Image: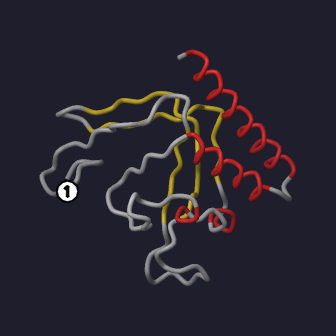
Amino acid sequence: MTVGSDGADDKPRTIREGEENHLCILTTKYPSKHKTSKPKSSRFVFAMFIIHEIFRGDDDESGYVLADDYWRLEFRPHEAEQINFGDFYQNSDGSTRWSGLIRYFDDALAVKFLERAVEVKCGTPKEEDFARKFLNHYKTLQRRELYEV
């Protein structure tokens, strides 16, 4: 099976949405046997970054995104557990079920994720300051895009 394929027919996956200069978040959840106070189904954010470049994919190769070298945040396990994906994102039917690899979200939701990142980084001044700068930079990027249209 190729990386990023759907496994059933081994066809590469393409990235339908997503744009450069927008937010990408990386999520995971603990294995079912992991000892944690969170429900085993809780999916949490362990990193986020501004998308620098996108290859959407084609018939031969799965799509991928490249992260900006500077605008990226990582979260320690105890921080990541405080950014539960289901607290922010719901499917169109209102559920938080997860299947597949990719979820797309708008800029308003991206700002909410970044605001939560600032809260989570509170208490570590240097990291909190960077998270706040990241949030402000993201807002500026999106305002700039609105004016360029």
Residue 25 x/y as whole percent: 53, 48
* SS label for mark 1: loop
- Tell me the quarter of the picture where residue 22 sits: top right
Label 1 is placed on what type of residue? Gly
Q: Position of residue 50 (x, y in %)?
A: 58, 36
Relative to 35, does residue 132 appear above or below in the rendering? above
Residue at screen point 71% across, 38% down? 134
Q: Which residue is mark 1?
A: 7
Name above or below for residue 93 compared with residue 26. Answer: below
For this rendering, which residue is in front, 76 or 137?
137
Residue 136 vs residue 48: left or right?
A: right
Q: Residue at x 53, y 35 (%)?
A: 67
In the displayed structure image, the side of residue 37 where residue 65 appears, left or right: left
In the image, taking residue 147 as reference, residue 104 lies left or right, namely left
Query: Does residue 28 sit above or below 65 in this rendering?
Result: below
Seen at 78% across and 42% down, the residue is: 132
Q: Position of residue 76 (x, y in %)?
A: 67, 61
